[in-house]
Image (spheres, rainbow, N blue to C red):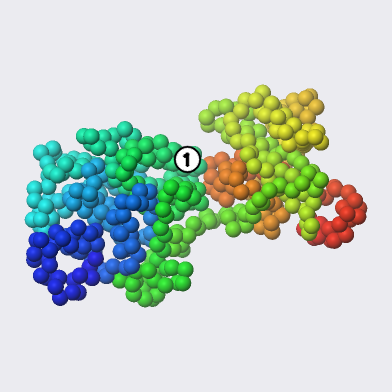
Amino acid sequence: MNQLKNQTKYKDIISDKASRRMLGERLAGFCSIYLPHYFTLKSAPFQLEMMELLENKKERFIEILAFRESAKSTLSMVAFPLWGALQGEYQFIILITSTFSQIKSHIANLKYEMDSNKLVREDFGNIQSDEEWTTTNMLLANGARIIGRSTGQKIRGIRHRQFRPDLIIIDDPESLEDVVSKEQRDKVEKWLRGEVMPALDKEKGRLIILGNLLHTDSLLSRIKNDKIFLTKEYPLLNNKEEIQWLGKYPTMAEIEKQKLFVKETSWQREYLLKIVPEEGQEIKEEWIQRYEKLPSENLILGKAIGVDLAISKKETANYTAMVSGIVVRESEMPKIYILPHSINARLSFHETILQAESCSEALGGNTGYANLIVEEVAYQKAAIEEMQKRMLPVQGIKVTMDKRARLRTISGYIQNGTILFPHNGCEDLLIQLLGFGIEEYDDLVDAFVLLTSYLKDYIIKKTNIEEIENKKNTFLPVLKKVF
């Protein structure tokens, strides 16, 4: 990129149109020749790698996670689309950001370079077509079109002449406010997969998404687990604590100066690409332990279903949640296995009773119906009474602590590996546990706490200790220690 300025032949190259055009065929050369005012610092290896990745048409779906002020937006929203349109690499480019004002700014930057950049005008001639440019739509004289959109806008089915979009670039599709609610996160992913991806040219369309990880369940976090995307991560400091861009931060002292202007949580998230737990987080992601398969039936000490009732189908209502689990006799200590596929839905009173009965029967299996554990409060008493009429094994639990305090009593069992989760099928529960206090809904957390409190206090402690001791002499002292 800007290293060419240090070469003795740079002035000769910059003064010769043919040399400029030849060098500008590659994105790095284009940036050095036509956009030196954007790239004033010595470039870093990761930036050259990023440019090669942007150029590589064989990689159709790319996710780039790069630290703040890494020049990723300059490269992706100015240099790359300008290069792609002027060189005729792409016919229909769509640029997307989270807000309309941001996308207008990016389009204005492109327009300025095409209108006012002396070398661009000299080498690419009359760039503007007869069609008047707007704040979000530009048709170039060579037939290439660039348009801007904001996250959530409709683009499916859009065309430019006979062309579907062959390049879509999305920069920072979410804000911190957007990732607070799971419903909003789901909405953004639904838009991406329902509007953006189907809009692409099916044979050669490319989708490039850039940003930071704002949440364990943000769109960019979800994409990391999508095998269709190639994900590249560029933190300011690599895993050896080496500075990734010496041109901007030549020493660690410079980095320490920068940190003075940034909150620690922002530094971790925006510069080191680490998902930072919010203050007051009760359950941390590194505590979560998974199991591969369920143990045999003869090791199961008890089964139950925690039920948090809402009994309303209104869109503004909370969800009815049911979380199932078993407590298992293990070689060293008893374990609680959370079962996959929890219930989390808006149900009427009648639907709730039927769903609870179905879950209880399915979990009970040959041993009869599994216990239903329900908080005994207000309208939930009516549900408990109805379950009792149906001869279901339901137990009402009177709760005296607030939600956070109740979850805190269980957190230690998650941290020490007593409570295990399946690899698949409990994603919504984990989202609520990890984001407790931030997530809009916590119904699954309530059901989980009811379940695990019961299995811990009413099954493990009330299991016949002498029977367990006869079968496993070393089990009793561990049992007393853990529970």
- Quadrant of the rendered image containing residue 444: top right
Q: Is residue 135 visible?
A: no
Mark 1 element type:
helix
Residue at x 52%, y 29% (from the top left corner): 315
* Depicted 101 relative to depicted 418: above or below: above
* Depicted 238 relative to depicted 324: above or below: below
Residue at x 69%, y 40% (from the top left corner): 324
- Quadrant of the rendered image containing residue 297: top right
In the image, 75: left or right of 258?
left
Residue 187 location (% of width, % of height): 44, 38
Residue 302 location (% of width, % of height): 79, 43
Q: Quadrant of the C terminus?
A: bottom right
- 214, 358: nearer the viewer: 358
In the image, 315: left or right of 25?
right
**Exactly how many numbered labels are in the figure?**
1
- Quadrant of the rendered image containing residue 92: top left
Residue 146 location (% of width, % of height): 23, 43
Residue at x 79%, y 24% (from the top left corner): 389
Three-letter code for the amino acid on which mark 1 is drawn: Asp
- Residue placed under numbered mark 1 in the picture: 186
* Depicted 19 relative to depicted 146: above or below: below
In the image, 13: left or right of 357?
left
Q: Quadrant of the N terminus?
A: bottom left
Residue at x 72%, y 38% (from the top left corner): 305
Q: Residues within 10 Å of mark 1 (few under 14, many from 20)?
A: some
Q: Is residue 425 visible?
A: yes
Residue 231 location (% of width, % of height): 42, 55
- 291, 434: nearer the viewer: 291
- 209, 278: nearer the viewer: 209
